[in-house]
Image (cartoon, grey):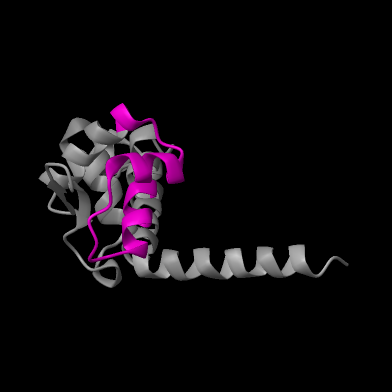
Amino acid sequence: MKITQAEDYGIRCVLYLSRYPKKVIPRWKIARAMDIPEPFLAKIAQDLARAGIIEIIRGRKGGYRLRIPPEELSLLRVMEAMSGELFLSPCVLDPTNCRRQPLCPVHHTWKELVDLIRQKLDGTTFADLVQKETCLLDRRSRKSHNPG
């Protein structure tokens, strides 16, 4: 499994919006803060909006705003909004694709792994990620102010 560029940028965008859950944030500000090319962010925002994760506000005071509170929005939901259902092998997504599936010893391992990954991603909210980010930033600033 490899995280796509679109998934990575989508996660970064939603993470930034999760810091300010009720605010409309201009696209350029998100792009600059999260190191996302602005044209790519515009495309990603369309996918996130279609999935009901963000709202796109047009006009001079426009930008993006979360539609789902960060504590209710999982990493899995954002990833799947960007790339579709998570899977490791086509046989897990649709067992009828493989005639060997009933006898394949690897199929069950793939299925277990997908279930574990989905469970972890679904159990990780953007509120959790914002909290972790805050802790990391605090730790970093303490280290820079207190040289060993």
> Measured along the vertical axis of the image, is residue 12 above or below residue 66?
above
The stretch of residues the image draws in magenta is 12-40
Q: Residue at x 46, y 38 (%)?
A: 35
Q: Is residue 85 visible?
A: no
Q: Residue at x 27, y 52 (%)?
A: 25
Return the x and y of residue 49 as percentages of the image width and height: 14, 46
Examine the image and state in which quarter residue 43 appears: top left
Q: Residue at x 39, y 48 (%)?
A: 12
Return the x and y of residue 77 as percentages of the image width and height: 25, 54
Q: Is residue 133 magenta?
A: no
Q: Name the magenta segment's main secondary structure.
A: helix
Return the x and y of residue 95 as percentages of the image width and height: 20, 40
> Measured along the vertical axis of the image, is residue 40 above or below residue 52?
above
The quadrant of the rendering that contains the N terminus is top left
Q: Is residue 21 magenta?
A: yes
Q: Is residue 56 left or right of residue 124?
A: left
Return the x and y of residue 50 as percentages of the image width and height: 11, 44
Q: Is residue 5 visible?
A: yes
- Please name whichever residue, 51 or 67, is drawn nearer the observer in this view of the structure: 67
